[in-house]
Image (cartoon, rainbow, N blue to C red):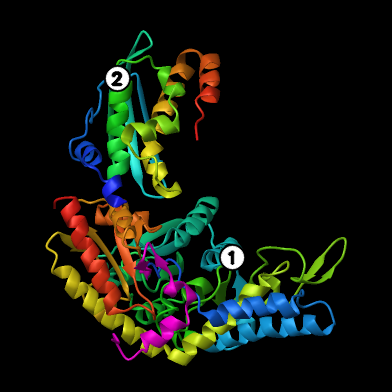
Amino acid sequence: MSDDIYREIILDHYRNPRNKGKIDNADVVIHDSNPLCGDQIDIYLKVVEGQIKDIKFDGKGCAISQASASMLTEMVMDKPLTTAKDISKDEVLENIGLTNLGPARIKCALLSLKVLKMGMVKYYSDKEPTTAEKMEKDSNLF
Amino acid sequence: MQSSELETNKIRNDFPILTRKINGKPFVYLDNASTTQKPLSVINKIVNYYSFYNSNIHRAVYDIAEEATHAYELTRQKVCKFINANSPQEIIFTRNATEAINLVSYSWGRKNIQKGDLIILSEQEHHSNIVPWQILAKEKNAKIKYLKIDETGNLNLNELEAYLNSNNNNIKLISLCHMSNALGNIIPIDKIINMAHAYGIPVFVDGAQSVPHLTTDVNSLDCEFLAFSAHKMLGPTGVGILYGKKNILEEMDPFICGGDMIKEVHKEKTLFNDLPYKFEAGTPNIADVIGFSSALDYLNEIGMDNIRNHEIELTKYALEKMSELKQIKVYGDVNLQNRGGIISFNLGDIHPHDLATILNEDCIAIRSGHHCAQVLMEKLEVSATSRVSFYIYNTKEEINIFINALGKAIKLFQL
């Protein structure tokens, strides 16, 4: 099974992460960590007219958490920010091709999604608090 | 093949879980610093209690309640003997070592720590020996100093002596782990206690990792407090032990309050029970305390010196095999006398969680993460390590399986 988990695509995104780094003057910067593993993810968002114009992540941790973050940035680049609330856990797991993770490792895979959703809520809570509340409710933060 | 004088083949037969095969592979359990497996005698002892004399203790007069009370108190006597305490009154059952530390930080700490006082810890403490003191220090406006460790994980006793010398009036407690759960390093606790006592300062020993693996004698150590957990020494989960010197425990106020810890309760006042019951409110974990007595019997039968020697031999073998892998970095002291059967390491830049997942494919259980020692991880400048830890039933064959699996990981990650 580890051959299944550590497939080429995961190792590729781990070794050569896409959209990794910081954005100067980002509209939102949000951080969270996985207390069990110590995985850390920061997400930087540049938002123009509700669209994610740029997204970068920074962080450290296991191959699954970092590759998953890398793939998530590709998934939402140039999409409306509100897309974040609609992305389901299963969608992310399918996107990275890891649908058989156990309860411990699944947190690694979903950390970046959680941070993205938190970032979306934070972005709106500064501008439209009522929208932010609704989004927090709709986004199934876990 | 025996890996030492311990009859590991015979020992392994006593542990049902070690007969398990997962996907056709034998279960290799190398996470003993986290919790150990339980021999059948411990499991049977618990089943026997629930089957034949389940009842609450210290209250009822009927026969089986007497039986249960007797069995519960017998464990206390065995613990007293195991660590060579003066009296069973000095043995308090808690949920785990963590609760034992919290009990002291709450009851002793709130009474004895004042504004500006200093508590001394080290950089390699488990979170359970940091956070309770941090909360206390915050509440009291007291301070915490962390003794530094060097690159091998050893404390510098000169630094401690300097603190003792200059802050004589302010240091109120030294609380240190005897064996690091993350590095396996054993500190010279007897020397440290002598140094502290020269200045009249009490010492709390976190023995969660040391008591299961080393002979412990609180009488000769002369520490004020010692905490450890049953589940790390073949016993059930949910049982911790706090040892405290009787005169100190007597001065302390209760921690958790309720039934069994009282002598008399009136509308306006309560008289507390004698030691150790003053600190054991409510119905305790009767079954698991009783089960723990079989674990102590098991360890006594093997002998703590033999256990130590077995672990030194396994650690030596594992360190030799691991050092043959050029991609590996091992943390902690290389001197086997200064460490227990715990090895923390990193393999190239493979994240420990990935490595643990890969090893799990070969049915090898290791721990990966920060080991509840994030202060230490910061010091080592890593976010996590992988950790193997041994006990009486581990063998050199298991270490070979582990080393082979490391080879597979190296190949998979193309290190």
Kindly identify which chain the residue marked by label 2 belongs to.
A
Q: Secondary structure at mark 1?
A: helix
Instruction: Find the residue positioned furthest to the top.
Output: A49
B227 lies left or right of B157: right
Image spot of residue B23 (x, y percent): 37, 62
The amino acid at mark 1 is: Leu
Kindly identify which chain the residue marked by label 1 belongs to.
B
Which residues make up the magenta segment? B1-30
The amino acid at mark 2 is: Met
Image spot of residue B43 (x, y percent): 58, 76
The residues bearing labels 1 and 2 have C-alpha atoms spaced at a distance of: 52 Å
Image spot of residue B42 (x, y percent): 56, 79
Q: Residues within 10 Å of mark 2 (few under 14, many from 20)?
A: some
Residue in the picture at 43% in, 33% down: A90
Which residue is nearer to you in this view: B294 or B50?
B50
The residue singled out by tag 1 in the image is B103
Residue in the picture at 45% in, 29% down: A88
Image spot of residue B288 (x, y percent): 62, 73
Q: Secondary structure at mark 2?
A: loop
The answer to whether residue B250 of the structure is visible from this angle is no
| Relative height, residue A120 to residue B106 (above, below) | above
The residue singled out by tag 2 in the image is A77
| Relative height, residue A133 to residue B122 (above, below) | above
Check residue B10 for magenta coloring.
Answer: yes
Q: Residues within 10 Å of mark 1 (few under 14, many from 20)?
A: many
Camera-near label (1 vs 2) is 2
Quarter of image, res B103: bottom right
Which residue is nearer to you in this view: B1 or B85?
B1
Residue in the picture at 47% in, 84% down: B222
Screen quadrant of the N terminus of chain B? bottom left
